[in-house]
Image (tube, helix red, strand yellow):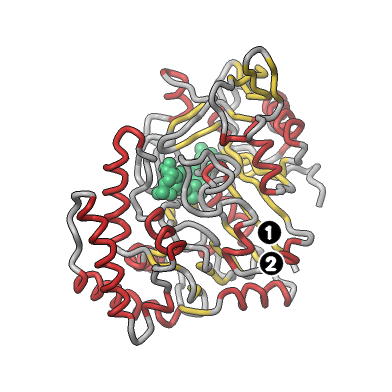
Amino acid sequence: MTLQIITGAQWGDEGKGRIVDWFAAQADLVARFNGGDNAGHSVTVGETLFKLHLVPSGIIHPKPVAVLGNGMVLNLRSLAAEVDMLQAAGIEITPARLRISHAAHIITPAHTALDAALEAARGGSSIGTTGRGIGPAYTSKAERSGLRMADLLAVNAGERIFAHVEACNRTLRALNAQPLNPTAVAEELHACAQRFAPFVADTAYESHQTLAQGGLLLAEGAQGTLLDIDHGTYPYVTSSATVAAGVFTGLGLGVTAAQNAVVTGVCKCFQTRVGSGPFPTEVDGDLALRLRGSGANPWDEYGTTTGRPRRVGWLDGVLLRYAARINGLTELVITKLDILSGFESLKLCVAYTKDGKTYPDLPFGPTELEGYEPVYEEMPGWDEDLSPLRDWDALPEAARRYLNAISRLTGLPVRLVSVGPEREQLVENPAYPR
Ligand code: GDP
Ligand code: IMO
Ligand code: MG
């Protein structure tokens, strides 16, 4: 049996979607285990750019079964739009190919309204959420008042939806926000639930079976390590377990499935973040513009879900080493190396300092960044356009030196490097231990 977990090693948007797509060609099952449509995963195949928010990125290949695991929160309206988009692009979406956990929680319009109202109430200290109702949906789950996929199909679904909307309306009124009409919400959820009823399954059992039969199960992380509810830059995080360990509860797999698991950390060759929160290696001005791009290219640093400009900075090797430890990464994939072409020199954060003392690792990880200053190692850049390259040895010496520095800092092999958004724009490391 083979479990491969693909997880974001930074603050999300590392390029997980296109890397999942790469490995999915060989996979039997590709599963999302956390988050909802706050995620935006891009896969570019030829001229077509797929922006996926809920359906696992492996769906573009004909073989793997796609699973929406119990750890997710599902907005069925978004799911319907995404399935329509995929079908219009000629991707087959049948109940045999897309499996939805009966235990996945539902994001209702009341959750989305609450997300907006709570962010407004936070004022200057808002989290900068994606506004997709993620926090309120996980709150309902933890509070044990949430609606699961199976609940929408139960005989008393109407009653439960009414009770849910009434409860959310009380909070909305308290926040001076517009309450919702329970009948309208119930009708919408009912219609969506009927559409997806044939897709509902015991996905924990099916995931287990895939592994038991010797298949390859790819688990596709959403968001990134530093947005994890426990291990990220709390409170500027999302509301789910984004780290590799989230796979076990989020899909319902026993921890013995971790034996010999491949844990792939996807890391952009510089740092980005959307929304509020600390970002020690952040840069601004012309440098930021160069890293972010103007927005003219589809791969420029503007949110796939919200379109917001992403904050950018130098790669933080200390936080990357932290991600390696917290996830138990076995390998790295470095993305967007093509973007660093043309920089005279590159900076890599290799340690922090505080009060004259140097810290190779942050004493309290990313939860305590106050007062710590990055220490940079500066390296020469390169001018060559990397986007046509497919051969490791053809990479400029300076690019290989940069990759080696990341490898040395984390103690991990770099298995793949991406040099453009397109499916084939990847360079495999021949030294990767197979
Ligand atoms: P995800 O959320 O981790 O799946 O990442 P996103 O899809 O939100 O953001 C990554 C962006 O970078 C997308 O626009 C990708 O098409 C793009 N991208 C991924 N890899 C590369 C690369 O190697 N080079 C360039 N130029 N763009 C890339
Ligand atoms: P992918 O899977 C980047 C960020 C938001 C905000 C915080 C909380 O594409 O990498 P939420 O809506 O989850 O309550 O927002 O988390 N965030 C992401 N940032 N990529 C994502 O997903 C994100 N999903 C949430 O910007 O700071
Ligand atoms: Mg994204």
For label 2, the SS is strand
Q: Using the numbered discs, state the Cα–Cα distance from disc 2 to disc 1 in whole angstroms.
A: 7 Å
Which residue corresponds to the image point at 44% horizontal and 59% vertical from the top-left? 138
- Residues marked 2 and 1 touching at CB (< 8 Å): yes
Which residue corresponds to the image point at 46% horizontal and 77% vertical from the top-left? 94
Decide: is 328 above or below 281: below
**Where in the figure is residue 331, as x and y percent of width and height?**
72, 46
**Where in the figure is residue 247, as x and y percent of width and height?**
61, 60
Location of mark 1 (residue): 4
Disc 2 marks a residue whose amino acid type is Leu
Q: Quadrant of the N terminus?
A: bottom right
Location of mark 2 (residue): 216
Of residues 175 and 325, the one drawn nearer to the viewer in this rendering = 175
* Any part of residue 295 in sight: yes
* In this picture, residue 320 sits left or right of residue 89: right
Of residues 318 and 87, the one drawn nearer to the viewer in this rendering = 318
Q: Earlier in the sequence, mark 2 or mark 1?
A: 1
**Where in the figure is residue 183, as x and y percent of width and height?**
19, 74
For label 1, the SS is strand
